[in-house]
């Protein structure tokens, strides 16, 4: 991950041992503990999950105290790991998606996260069931009305500072602020209040991928103990709270959670990422009224000055054997200005080349051009369109599909704005969970064979002793 990302995370209090040794359970012990975890989850009445950096390492985001953690490498004077993909293109892990399924099933009641990567929200955890104690690198908030804006790009500041954007509420318009804490910032009271409330009533607090050393957040799981609840810890490294836990599992979080989900007969859902782009087409008659001067612009749904990080370039060609010159737009703002005959009707083809980290190279959108602004501004059912996109992507195991979800007509200047949704990533987890299921079955068979062997050896020893005594 880049140095900028490490600096963004430096608000966390640097305490405790870094470069901590990682431990791994023997396969048979690991399987027994996973079975116990699955039963604990199944019997829970109010399950709360507390997550740390370890839940996102499989997403290409480094942790802090592990052998290749940010603080470990900084202390040893070694370079930070290079990102395999841009931070804004990181996709939720198998564990993130398993938590989504547990929440949908009504088992998981609340998630508390120390991470600022925004992957819980992106995975589908409802905002009202999530406390992000240290903020979110992709979230802006309005200090006046409290509105939140989840972006597809990293917010440029940290430390609750003002950003370059304003609240979109017509009755507000206040300057927005980032949500990522800096060194001197206290934990947000609203997030802490919700987290404390759910920990107090939890019968199980499941801690995933956290060293439980950052105060005061690390003490939240302990609050369930007063009401008779229990703590379960899944982490490769030892934590100061291990002695308080009823179950400690040393293993990769994804592997442990995949095993538990199989034992619960629950499928880990796929992750489908959908990004949005506005295509704005404005038109005006020339002074002699013989031509139409028009401009095509691709813009972010977060504002015309906001970046479009998932788009690398745009290639524009024309159908119907038109002799109009094709164009390639390499930089933002992605816009094309042209003049055509007043009566000319044609169609443009936009090949949107997607950035690194997307699951496909490009997506194609056809834009019809009429000299006059169309009056058809019927709005499709956004939720239905998005669900159809997801279903199509999952069924075909591919992305790049797109669909229009909103259209607006403006009279001054004459123009239309169409908002398109594009499937840019799809991650399936069935194969991974099935692979673990096969491994788990193999481990259970090994355990059974060892037990049978032990019983057999024991009975053989007894028989030999009996013969000797005679």
Image (tube, rainbow, N blue to C red):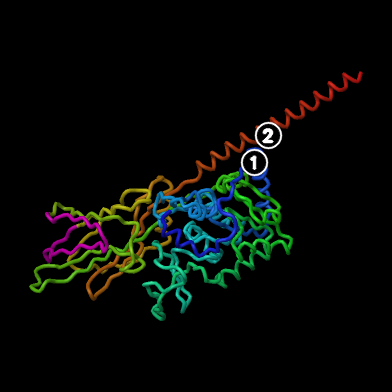
Q: In the visual, does 174 lie left or right of 240?
A: left
Q: Is residue 73 left or right of residue 34?
A: left
Residue 296, numbered circle: none
**Residue beneath disc 2:** 447
Residue 374 locus on image (x, y percent): 24, 67
Residue 59 visible? The answer is yes
Query: Residue at 36% of width from left, 62% of height from top?
Result: 405
At which x and y percent is residue 62?
49, 52
Indicate whether residue 334 is drawn in magenta. yes
Task: Looking at this view, name the residue that lies furthest to the right.
Answer: 470
Q: Is residue 170 left or right of residue 35?
A: left
- Vertical side of 158 occupied by 94: above or below: above
Residue to which mark 1 is pinned: 31
In this orientation, does residue 261 appear? no
Magenta range:
323-346
How many callouts does the rendering have?
2
Q: Residue at x 63, y 38 (%)?
A: 27
Q: Earlier in the sequence, mark 1 or mark 2?
A: 1
Name the one closer to the observer, 288 or 170: 170
Q: Badge 2 local density, few (<14 within 10 Å), some, or many (20+)?
A: some
């Amino acid at each position: 991950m880049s140095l900028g990302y490490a600096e963004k995370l430096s608000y966390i209090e640097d305490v405790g041992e870094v470069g901590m040794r990682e431990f791994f359970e023997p396969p048979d012990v690991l399987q027994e503990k996973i079975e116990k975890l699955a039963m604990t989850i199944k019997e829970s009445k109010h399950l709360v999950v507390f997550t740390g950096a370890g839940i996102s390492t499989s997403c290409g985001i480094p942790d802090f105290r592990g052998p290749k953690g940010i603080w470990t490498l900084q202390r040893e004077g070694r370079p930070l790991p290079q990102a395999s993909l841009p931070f804004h293109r990181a996709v939720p892990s198998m564990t993130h998606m398993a938590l989504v399924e547990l929440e949908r099933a009504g088992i998981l009641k609340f998630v508390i996260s120390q991470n600022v990567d925004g992957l819980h929200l992106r995975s589908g955890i409802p905002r009202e069931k999530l406390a992000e104690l240290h903020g979110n690198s992709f979230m802006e908030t309005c200090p006046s009305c409290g509105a939140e804006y989840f972006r597809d790009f990293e917010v440029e500041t940290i430390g609750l500072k003002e950003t370059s954007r304003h609240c979109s509420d017509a009755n507000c318009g206040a300057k927005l602020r980032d949500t990522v804490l800096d060194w001197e910032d206290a934990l947000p009271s609203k997030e802490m209040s919700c987290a404390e409330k759910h920990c107090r009533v939890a019968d199980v607090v499941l801690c995933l991928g956290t060293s439980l050393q950052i105060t005061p957040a690390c003490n939240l799981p302990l609050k369930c103990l007063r009401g008779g609840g229990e703590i379960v810890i899944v982490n490769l490294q030892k934590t100061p709270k291990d002695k308080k836990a009823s179950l400690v599992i040393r293993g990769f979080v994804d592997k442990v959670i995949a095993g538990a989900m199989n034992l619960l007969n629950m499928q880990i859902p796929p992750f489908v990422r959908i990004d949005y782009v506005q295509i704005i087409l404005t038109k005006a008659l020339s002074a002699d009224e013989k031509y139409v001067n028009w401009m095509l612009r691709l813009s972010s749904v977060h504002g015309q000055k906001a970046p479009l990080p998932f788009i690398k370039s745009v290639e524009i060609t024309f159908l119907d054997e038109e002799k109009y010159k094709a164009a390639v737009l390499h930089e933002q703002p992605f816009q094309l200005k042209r003049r055509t005959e007043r009566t000319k009707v044609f169609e443009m083809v936009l090949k949107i080349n997607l950035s690194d980290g997307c699951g496909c190279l490009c997506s194609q959108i056809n834009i019809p051009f009429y000299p006059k602004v169309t009056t058809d501004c019927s709005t499709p059912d956004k939720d239905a369109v998005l669900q159809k996109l997801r279903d199509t992507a999952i069924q075909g195991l591919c992305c790049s599909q797109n669909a229009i979800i909103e259209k607006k007509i403006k009279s001054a200047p004459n123009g239309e704005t169409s908002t398109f949704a594009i499937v840019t990533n799809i991650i399936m987890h069935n194969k991974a969970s099935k692979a673990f299921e096969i491994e788990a079955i193999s481990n259970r068979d090994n355990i059974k064979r060892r037990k049978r062997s032990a019983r057999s050896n024991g009975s053989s020893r007894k028989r030999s002793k009996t013969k000797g005594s005679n």
